[in-house]
């Protein structure tokens, strides 16, 4: 392959995998050669014994990543006579049939497709995986932070049972942004996490170049004039993007898909206005695979182009060398920004370049103190600050995910045709590798009783659990294999070509901005869930479904330190410097960093919490249980009480004994996960109390707020 040497990470990984039988985590940045570092020693190990069963299972979070890695692994294997297969919804039946008939070598798969094999090909599982030796988990951090991680862990436990409970299968995790190595080690081996070896890339340090471009959207009383002014500012932002990007390959990340579409439109308009020969591409999860793959192919070809994207290109999909990464809007997490920045500067000697594009709102004359702090700017600075220090959010797997547990109960029963309650409990909750160790026998029994009441399962005379009518219906649904929530989608079609999907449906005659182009909806076909569109001159910002991201307490505390500080930040432009100075002045005058209670009016007070999203939601629930309605303002909770009464309420909450199950009833929305709707209120309250609330964090905030102020 014309390699002249191996990278240090690859050398260390070879020793780690070839000289012991331990599980291994390879921690290194994007484009550091992690895939080869794992597969070179693994393929050497299986080269003489690669037939008769899948020897290596590669699990990736995205179909696009599977396709990309398939090409890389196939290239490594072409001289070894080791077969390489992939399995997901877009893979042909012929390719899948070859694996079933002659299993062997390497199989690349998503967790959802692995689940499908368990349910639909159960008679072949022994032949497919009886000789499994290695499981490679790519983008390990993405599984540690989501329900899919619990799902995958359960599937891995079930894989071990195919070999009689053998612990000989070795797990290899690949990641660029693990926040807590202890969590990652426990994920790979809960019984002996310290035995999981961690291989760091000690040579991954690169020069980082930063620039933050700040813009002020002016406030106007007239709504139409306000919209026009916002459009003017967004056009200025797009003009700067074109100036910064032209002539090179770049990625611009946005937090929400509507911003991806909006700025793609504006940048394309600017390119057309300047008559430039340069492309702005679009990439997000609602677009068709064909459009996404076209964008990936253009980027990989080396042709200068910029792709405006959502988190879909955070993962390690090979798109060639990217000179610059842009972030549109305030980053919500250090881990996400680190992952995005890692896409640039792949070549030897190249720096990593990050530009932040941040539009701040000019406060109205009636705006309160919090609105004058420009918190998006302060959060952006805090996240960048922590990233440069090398900190990232610790991973926090679910402690009590009864939704995924429900799905796995149905899946195991479907795989075996039935199972005893004891067998289900042992496999899911008591096995050393079980995915639900926090679910005790009493709670598991209540879950099964609830599923029986809802006809998801039923009992036989022999005491086995089998699927009920509702359970059978769920198992047959094509969406069963994914544990994450999926919205009802409509296909967007132009002359029978699929452009992508939308969850929030416009009306006939509406204009639509999609795939970076302007369309008009000419037909809404509710029977077939289709939107038929034609090219148009008008446009309307699209709406997409999506959940708000959480912010860690460490980020909020760093925001407080930045507001208290006086140091200058060289990566801010002149507008950013002025906005920061204004924010610090307002913070100083209102004492928002020192005071726990900040009056916002005669009968309105800000409770300055400075905590993470989970503890904030706990405080919201505690206040709601006490009959106090409040607004979540990120760094604070705003209550319609005068300051003295607010102090009394907080002091009372700090003294009061919290009843976790009762508090669960005050958390909204109650149904977050896919199968929550099949659980009764008692189970939902238990799950919320254990999994979505942070009682210790809330208690720390309350105690901090009622402490007498220190005397300097």
Image (tube, rainbow, N blue to C red):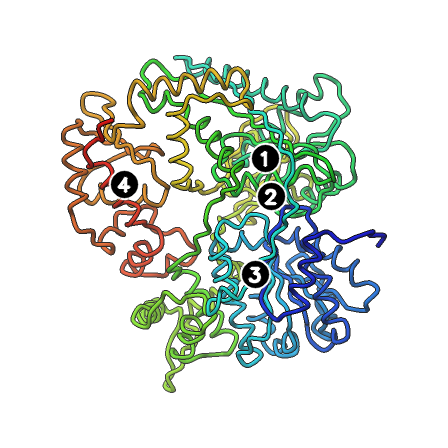
Disc 2 versus disc 3: distance between alpha carbons? 20 Å
Task: Return the residue at label 1.
Answer: 253
Q: Which numbered disc flags the more N-terminal residue, 1 or 4?
A: 1
Disc 1 versus disc 3: distance between alpha carbons? 26 Å
Q: Residues within 10 Å of mark 3 (few under 14, many from 20)?
A: many
Q: Nearer the viewer, mark 2 or mark 4?
A: 4
Quick check: marks 1 and 3 in contact, CB under 8 Å? no
Q: 233 or 19: which is nearer to us?
A: 19
Q: Residues within 10 Å of mark 1 (few under 14, many from 20)?
A: many
Q: Which numbered disc flags the more N-terminal residue, 3 or 4?
A: 3
Q: Which numbered disc flags the more N-terminal residue, 1 or 3?
A: 3
Task: Return the residue at label 3.
Answer: 112
Task: Return the residue at label 4.
Answer: 701
Quick check: marks 2 and 4 in contact, CB under 8 Å? no
Q: Nearer the viewer, mark 3 or mark 4?
A: 4
Q: The residue tagged with tag 4: helix, strand or loop?
A: helix
Q: Which numbered disc flags the more N-terminal residue, 2 or 3?
A: 3
Residue depicted at 36% across the width and 52% down the height:
671
Q: The residue tagged with tag 2: helix, strand or loop?
A: loop
Q: Nearer the viewer, mark 2 or mark 3?
A: 2
Residue depicted at 69% across the width and 73% down the height:
100
Task: Return the residue at label 2.
Answer: 314
């Amino acid at each position: 392959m014309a390699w002249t040497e191996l990278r240090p990470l690859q050398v260390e990984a070879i020793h780690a995998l070839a000289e012991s039988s331990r599980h291994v985590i390879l921690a290194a940045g994007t484009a550091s050669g992690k895939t080869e570092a794992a597969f070179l020693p693994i393929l050497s190990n299986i080269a003489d014994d690669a037939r008769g069963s899948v020897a290596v299972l590669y699990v990736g979070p995205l179909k696009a990543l599977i396709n990309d890695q398939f090409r890389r692994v196939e290239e490594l294997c072409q001289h070894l006579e080791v077969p390489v297969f992939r399995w997901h919804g877009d893979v042909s039946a012929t390719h899948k049939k070859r694996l079933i008939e002659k299993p062997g070598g390497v199989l690349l798969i998503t967790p959802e497709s692995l689940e499908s094999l368990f349910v639909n090909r159960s008679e072949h599982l022994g032949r497919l995986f009886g000789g499994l030796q290695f499981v490679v988990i790519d983008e390990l951090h993405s599984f540690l932070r989501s329900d899919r991680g619990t799902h995958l862990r359960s599937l891995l436990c079930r894989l071990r049972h195919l070999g009689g409970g053998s612990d000989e299968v070795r797990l290899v995790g690949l990641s660029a942004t693990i926040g807590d190595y202890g969590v990652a080690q426990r994920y790979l081996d809960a019984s002996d996490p310290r035995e999981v070896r961690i291989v760091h890339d000690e040579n991954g340090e690169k020069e980082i170049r930063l620039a933050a471009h700040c813009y002020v959207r002016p406030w106007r009383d007239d709504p139409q004039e306000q919209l026009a002014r916002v459009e003017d500012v967004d056009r200025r932002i797009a003009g700067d993007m074109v100036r910064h990007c032209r002539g090179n390959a770049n990625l611009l990340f946005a937090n929400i898909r509507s911003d991806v579409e909006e700025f793609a439109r504006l940048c394309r308009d600017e390119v057309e206005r300047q008559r430039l020969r340069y492309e702005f591409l679009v990439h997000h999860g609602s677009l068709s695979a064909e459009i996404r793959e076209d964008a990936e192919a253009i980027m990989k070809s080396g042709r200068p182009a910029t792709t405006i994207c959502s988190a879909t290109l955070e993962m390690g999909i090979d798109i060639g060398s990217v000179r610059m990464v842009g972030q549109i809007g305030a980053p919500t997490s250090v881990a996400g920004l680190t992952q995005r920045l890692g896409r640039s500067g792949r070549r030897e000697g190249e720096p990593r370049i990050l530009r932040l594009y941040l539009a701040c709102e000019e406060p109205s004359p009636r705006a309160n103190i919090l609105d004058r702090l420009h918190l998006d700017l302060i959060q952006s600075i805090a996240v960048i600050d922590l990233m440069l220090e090398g900190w990232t959010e610790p991973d926090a797997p679910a402690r009590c995910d009864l939704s995924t547990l429900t799905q796995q109960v149905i899946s195991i029963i479907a795989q075996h045709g039935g199972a005893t309650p004891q067998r289900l409990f042992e496999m899911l909750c008591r096995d050393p590798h079980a995915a639900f160790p926090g679910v005790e026998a009493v709670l598991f029994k209540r879950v099964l009783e609830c599923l029986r009441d809802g006809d998801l399962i039923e009992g036989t005379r022999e005491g086995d659990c089998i699927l009920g009518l509702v359970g059978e219906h769920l198992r047959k649904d094509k969406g069963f294999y994914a544990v994450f929530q999926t919205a009802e989608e409509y296909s967007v079609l132009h002359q029978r070509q699929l452009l992508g999907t939308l969850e929030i449906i416009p009306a006939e005659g509406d204009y639509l901005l999609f795939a970076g182009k302007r369309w008009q909806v000419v037909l809404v076909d509710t029977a077939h869930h289709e939107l038929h569109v034609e090219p148009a001159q008008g446009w309307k910002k699209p709406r997409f479904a999506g959940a708000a991201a959480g912010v860690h307490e460490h980020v909020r505390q760093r925001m407080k330190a930045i507001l208290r500080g006086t140091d200058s930040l060289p990566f801010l432009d002149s507008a950013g410097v002025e906005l920061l100075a204004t924010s610090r002045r307002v913070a100083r005058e209102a004492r928002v960093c020192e005071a726990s209670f900040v009056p916002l009016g005669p009968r309105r007070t800000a409770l300055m919490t400075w905590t993470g999203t989970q503890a904030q939601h706990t405080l919201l629930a505690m206040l709601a249980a006490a009959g106090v309605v409040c607004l979540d303002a990120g760094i604070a909770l705003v209550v319609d009480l005068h300051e003295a009464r607010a102090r009394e309420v907080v002091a009372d909450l700090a003294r009061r004994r919290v009843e976790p199950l009762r508090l669960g009833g005050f958390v909204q929305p109650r149904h977050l996960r896919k199968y929550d709707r099949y659980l009764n209120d008692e189970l939902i309250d238990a799950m919320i109390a254990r999994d979505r609330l942070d009682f210790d964090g809330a208690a720390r905030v309350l105690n901090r707020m009622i402490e007498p102020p220190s005397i300097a």
